[in-house]
Amino acid sequence: MKLRITTLSENTAGLGSFLGEWGLSILVETEEMNVLLDTGQSISAVHNADILGIDLGQVDKIVLSHGHFDHTGGLRQVLGRMRKEVEIIAHPDMWQAKYSRREGVDRYIGIPFAREELEGLGANFKLTPEPVRLTDNIMTTGEIPMVTEFEEIDADLVVKEGTGFKPDKILDDRALIINTGAGLVVVLGCAHRGIINTLYYAQQLTGVKPIHMVLGGCHLISATEERIWLTIAALKELGVERLGVSHCTGMPAAMVMAPEFGESFFFNNAGTQINF
């Protein structure tokens, strides 16, 4: 299977003129289809695509991992560059009024655009909680079951309903699964519902056990030391061959993981390209 994965937006940038920006956007290119997972926070995905000579007009579908601003804020720029109608696959909950509640302050962290504006730019939203098969070898997870005992959703993430708030279960959290024939490649947005929960579900959906690579945000930025070590143990038990961390993994967790995985570990920042 011919496959190229390019990280267009991430907190940190590679050499040259690449732009780093809090958020994530990863382009998956195959002979069958080009899929963009998330669009970053604002201009970085388009800027870095230009540097790499990537034509975003060749993207066939967009998948949104969840409805936070740092994964959807680049939609206006990306759609403007594509200049065509494009299917955007996401969960219905992506349009919820999502907030972060810290130290008594509620801060809006949801999509920064109205749906009508994006549709006017060519967005054709396919909203479903179910897994979506894009090609014979690429699919989305849909809603990810919470099965591990040590992974939990941040308590400071809430959804506004009327005049009140409720905990955000982030049911819209999803990942992209690629079956390379040599094992799965699982591309994460933020893994809010747990990186290990996500990998277990990817195996369940595909019936494929070997995991060649995990790439993207692992959301360990606020994890306890115990959770980080339990995650490392589970990744080793799963036999993950390569681990490229990004975005919300957090530097403290990444620095613990790096020596545990040795040469299999890498920082997946803006400008990184991986060819299969």
Image (spheres, helix red, strand yellow):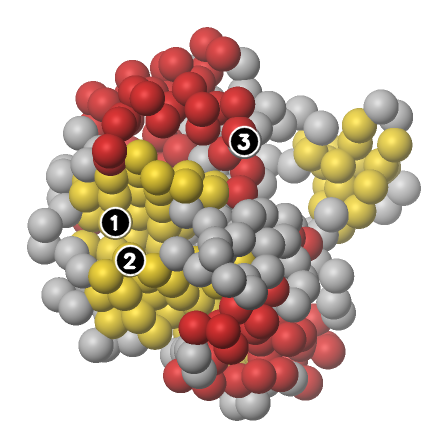
Q: Amino acid at mark 2?
A: Ile
Q: Considering the numbered disc 1 on the image, is that residue within a helix, a strand or a loop?
A: strand
Q: Taking the image as drawn, is residue 166 in sight?
A: yes
- The residue indicated by pointer 2 is 274
Indicate which label's residue lies in the foreground, 2 or 1: 2
Q: Earlier in the sequence, mark 3 or mark 1?
A: 1
Cα–Cα gap, marks 3 and 1 = 21 Å
Label pair 2/1, CB-CB below 8 angstroms: no
Q: For the view shown, which residue lies furthest in the bottom direction?
A: 84
Task: Name the foreground residue: 184 vs 242.
Answer: 242
- The residue indicated by pointer 3 is 250
Q: Taking the image as drawn, is residue 127 in sight?
A: no
Image vertical order of residue 51 relative to residue 273, above or below = below
Image vertical order of residue 147 relative to residue 28, above or below = above
Asked where in the image residue 157 lies, by quadrant, the reply is top right
- The residue indicated by pointer 1 is 185
Q: Residue 72, how many percent across, how many down?
A: 62, 60
